Image: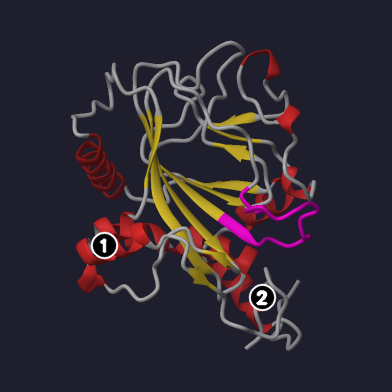
């Protein structure tokens, strides 16, 4: 089918053409059908290595001790390192990465805003996160039929089931609700039978709809812990929204204030409201200008 310059949805046309130019048609179909897709090689190997090393360095500063990605024995928790943009401008590359960003713009529109950019560091043997949908933010069911939130999860290390890979319930973005108490677990006999591990290599990006049920946690066999290996798993998560309170207070901060003034402001005011620019289109779809 030939895509014309249709006045009914000019931004959607631009977004779609960009996806075609980037060769993301298969990813777009997976995202629509299942609520998530994997963009392999989203980061170059050198980019992945430099970001991973910087994340480990920042985490060591916060924890006050060294971390070993290959043979960790002490830290068995899942720690979330916030405010990566304030810590080092290098992380901007994760936010403006063309291929994941094109898929995010399809879900949320061109005027989506950055909500947070942080990293999960998962030690061996610790518990995983419960399954949840990022859309809710306290909002009641049912969810709207369009995306209000979307995420990109960059694998800084290889994701395997043994190491507590990212977990999803395929197609759950169509349920229009948060997972129930009985559906949330990934461990033991209560493990949700529909949850699957997303096993990818370092540098890959998992792009997903905010209403899809997911967890950065255990996809191990029943009765196993979240990360059953002796190795640490590291991820960088980039969250965007059409309208929401931002997790990080980006507005009013410039590169000149990083990492000191900006980080202090963000930590003291991490729920500053940031609304999407008003447009004539409905939330969650490419807007008409």
- Asked if 232 appears above or below 33 in the picture, the reply is above
Q: Position of residue 113 (x, y in %)?
A: 51, 69
Are the residues at dot 2 and dot 1 in contact (C-beta closer than 8 Å)?
no
Between tags 2 and 1, which lies in front?
Answer: 1
Per the rendering, the mark at residue 280 is: none
Between 31 and 233, the residue placed more toward the observer is 233
Q: Using a 10 Å C-alpha cutoff, classify the residue at mark 1 as few (fewer than 14 neighbours), some (14 to 19) or many (20 or more).
A: few
Q: Using a 10 Å C-alpha cutoff, classify the residue at mark 2 as few (fewer than 14 neighbours), some (14 to 19) or many (20 or more).
A: some
- Asked if 217 appears above or below 177 in the picture, the reply is above
Q: Position of residue 70 (x, y in %)?
A: 28, 23
Residue ID at (45%, 57%): 116
Q: Which residues are magenta?
A: 134-150
Between 114 and 174, the residue placed more toward the observer is 114
Disc 2 is placed on an element classified as: helix
Marks 2 and 1, how far apart in space? Answer: 30 Å
Instruction: From the image, tell me which residue sits under label 2.
Output: 12
Residue 24 colored in magenta in the image = no
Between 86 and 199, the residue placed more toward the observer is 86
Q: How many marks?
A: 2
Residue ID at (72%, 23%): 193
Per the rendering, the mark at residue 89 is: 1
Q: Position of residue 208 (x, y in %)?
A: 60, 50
Residue ID at (47%, 58%): 247
Disc 1 is placed on an element classified as: helix
Residue ID at (40%, 16%): 229
Colour convention: secondary structure
Look at the image and tell me in which quarter the C terminus lies. bottom right
Q: Specify which label sits upstream in the sequence, 2 or 1.
A: 2
């Amino acid at each position: 089918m030939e895509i014309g310059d249709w006045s009914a949805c000019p931004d959607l046309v631009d977004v779609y053409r960009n996806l075609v130019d980037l060769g993301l048609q298969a990813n777009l179909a997976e995202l629509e059908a299942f609520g998530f897709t994997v963009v392999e090689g989203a980061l170059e190997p050198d980019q992945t290595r430099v970001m991973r090393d910087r994340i480990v360095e920042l985490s060591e500063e916060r924890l006050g001790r060294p971390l070993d990605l290959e043979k960790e024995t002490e830290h068995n928790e899942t720690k979330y390192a916030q405010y990566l943009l304030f810590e080092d401008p290098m992380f901007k590359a994760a936010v403006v990465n063309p291929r994941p960003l094109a898929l995010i713009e399809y879900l949320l529109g061109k005027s989506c805003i950055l909500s947070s950019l942080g990293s999960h560091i998962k030690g061996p043997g610790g518990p995983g996160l419960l399954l949840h949908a990022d859309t809710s933010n306290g909002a009641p069911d049912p969810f709207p039929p369009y995306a209000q939130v979307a995420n990109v999860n960059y694998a800084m290390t290889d994701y395997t089931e043994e190491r507590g890979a990212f977990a999803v319930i395929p197609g759950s973005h169509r349920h229009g609700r948060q997972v129930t108490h009985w559906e949330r677990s990934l461990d033991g006999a209560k493990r949700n039978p529909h949850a699957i591990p997303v096993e990818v290599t370092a540098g890959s990006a998992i792009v997903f709809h905010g209403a899809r049920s997911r967890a950065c946690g255990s996809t191990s066999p029943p009765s196993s812990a979240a990360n059953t290996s002796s190795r640490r798993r590291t991820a960088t998560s980039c969250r965007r929204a059409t309208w929401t309170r931002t997790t990080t207070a980006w507005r009013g901060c410039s590169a000149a204030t990083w990492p000191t003034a900006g980080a202090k402001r963000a930590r003291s005011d991490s729920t500053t409201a940031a609304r999407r620019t008003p447009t004539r289109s409905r939330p969650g779809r490419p807007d008409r200008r």
